[in-house]
Amino acid sequence: FPYEKVRERTLYLQVLDFDRFSRNDPIGEVSIPLNKLSDLGHMQTFWKELKPCMDGAGRRGDLLVSLCYNPTANTITVNIIKARNLKAMDIGGTSDPYVKLWLMHKDKRIEKKKTVTIKCCLNPVFNESFPFEVPAHVLRETTIIITVMDKDRLSRNDVIGKIYLSWKSGPAEVKHWKDMMGRPRTNVAQWHALKA
């Protein structure tokens, strides 16, 4: 490019997590408009904060979950119904998803459960229910962490995305939790966007 044209360009850098057996996962990106730099003829050093990837590579998919609170039995039943548009984690453009659930009290892990693995699928249907015993007096300090994983035979399993369900999570998660509490003994289903 002629020098005058270079000043009209933007340098785009993407930081990736290398994975020998599957796709490299984007960690973040930086855009540097070259017209903002004082002197392109000399080396410049500066720090830039990584931003989430905006090209859709950061999209992890959605999970349909139903919750049912039974105050008599002191249980919350979590039904992992299905997922859609999961991020492909394997080289072949698919994933082998399963879902891991942790019942947390404050920051302590109380109980772990998981679904079966569904091979080569980005829109898996699980339809698996998991009851957790949760006494009424600890409900406000309880969190259910739901993690969608990609099973790998040759390396560590990859996290596709997570959901934190409690009184103090994000707006969609809090709404689901409150809907569950407001409608005891009823399965309350809601889609959740998976987060990193």
Image (cartoon, rainbow, N blue to C red):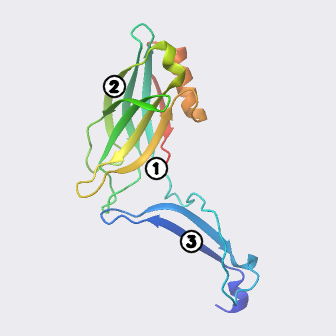
Relative side of 110 to 1, left or right: left
Could you tell me which secondary element the residue under label 1 belongs to? loop
User: Residue 152: image x %, image y %?
Assistant: 27, 53
Relative side of 127 to 55, left or right: left
Residue at image mark 3: 13
Question: Residue at point 33% right, 26% down?
Answer: 129
Relative side of 154 to 53, left or right: left
The reply to whether the C-beta atoms of the residues labelled 1 and 3 are less than 8 Å apart is no
> Which class describes the residues within 10 Å of circle 3: few (<14), some (14-19), or many (20+)?
few
- Marker disc for residue 29: none
User: Residue 3: image x %, image y %?
Assistant: 70, 91
Which residue ends up furthest to the bottom in the rendered image?
A: 2
Residue at image mark 1: 60
Residue at image mark 2: 130
Question: Residue at point 35% right, 48% down?
Answer: 122
Relative side of 99 to 16, left or right: left
Q: CA distance from mark 2 to mark 1?
A: 23 Å
Q: Is 111 rendered above or below residue 3?
A: above
Which residue ends up furthest to the front in the rendered image?
A: 108
